Image (spheres, rainbow, N blue to C red):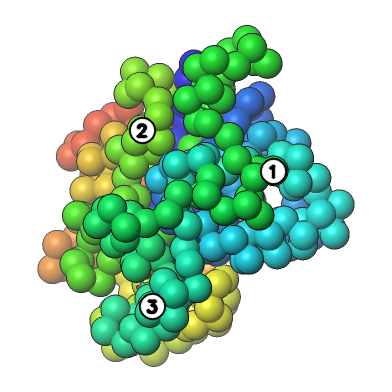
Amino acid sequence: MFADVVVDLQYGDCGKGKVAHALCNENDYTHVIRYNGGCNAGHTIYHNGKKFVTHHIPCGVFYGIKSIIGPGCVVHVDSFLEEIQELEDAGIPARSLVKIASNAHLITDFHRAEDSKDSEIGTTKRGNGPAYRDKYYRKGVRASFDPRLQHFIISMYHELYENEEFEEIKILFEGAQGFGLDPDWGDYPYVTSSHCTVGSAVLNGVPTSCIRDVWGVAKIYETYVGAKKFEGDDEIFQEIRELGSEYGATTGRERQVNWMDFDLLKMGLRINGVNKLVINKMDILEQLDVWCLYDGPNLYEFECREDIELWIFAKIESEISGDVEIMFSGDKERI
Ligand code: IMP
Ligand code: MG
């Protein structure tokens, strides 16, 4: 068994969907597994020229790969079934490919109603926080208890360890949200309620020894959606938001924009053991030809794309490792 993991290194919305989609194209994975989060996530995927926004469902469905919502996830049944239907209507055989681990938890309408009252954190109001709270408070309900999900339910253990259908299990773990929103490593309490690190992927039932590549995904600038003030004062952030279409895929909210915080990137690379790094949205800053980032409290401005790339290469090589493969990418490029 081996597993590649995709981890967002900032605040979500860095293009995990694009990376996962490209990886599915290039590898013969037997499973794509979502390892955390619920329908707070919004993954935008372009498949055969058509735009799809998925919330619960992993991208393996676009490639005919068995796609599992893992035990680390929470599921809102009505939204999940709607998503299945939308994909089926678009000709994607989601009903047969998507599975839900029996020990994933449910987001109930009660959780949603409670979350809808949030104003402090700026949640997506999808019921995630209350669902995870109840899970850990041992008052939650597992997915296997909902009769509407029976068709989709599997035992994760059986699937990975007692399944003769596959000679070798090859997994792509697709995370939701991002390292900067992790409850332990993010700016608590402005975080989500499930873990967004490579460790979270492992919690879904695989040994650490099977991890092959850890793909870290970042953007050349940062965005964050939520209640705290995040955006810098420069008017350029407004322009970046427009050019980069930085509006939430789930809630349509404006994403706040700021320059890359290299310290956060460094921490995410180290803690997740990233060996492949994709820095997305280079094409957006290229249109403005403005290249800045924060290194600690210092804001650096670079003359051109090549200069910022060289700086990032050198910093990662000297401060983390020379073994991190770094790819800079625009929206239209396939990594
Ligand atoms: P919750 O996960 O809905 O509880 O929201 C907690 C925080 O995480 C809020 O700041 C949300 O905007 C943020 N968040 C949750 N999911 C995503 C996502 O998929 N992309 C970006 N931000 C997210
Ligand atoms: Mg998103």
Q: Looking at the image, is mark 2 or mark 1 earlier in the sequence?
A: 1
**Residue hosting label 2:** 202
Mark pair 1, 3: CA separation: 28 Å
Task: Say if 23 sits above or below 225 in the image.
Answer: above
Residue at image location 72% in from the left, 56% down from the top = 84
Mark 3 C-beta closer than 8 Å to ligand 1: yes
**Residue hosting label 3:** 115
Can you give x and y, in whole percent of width and height, for residue 203 in the image? 34, 36
**Amino acid residing under circle 1:** His
Report the disc number at residue 218. none
**Residue hosting label 1:** 151
Can you give x and y, in whole percent of width and height, for residue 196 in the image? 34, 50
Is 271 displayed left or right of 204 in the figure? left
On the image, which quarter does residue 139 sit in? Answer: bottom left
Is 273 displayed left or right of 143 in the figure? left
Cβ–Cβ below 8 Å for labels 1 and 3? no
Task: Say if 218 sits above or below 225 in the image.
Answer: above
Task: Say if 38 sits above or below 207 in the image.
Answer: below
**Amino acid residing under circle 3:** Asp
Residue at image location 52% in from the left, 49% down from the top = 145
Is 208 displayed left or right of 154 in the figure? left
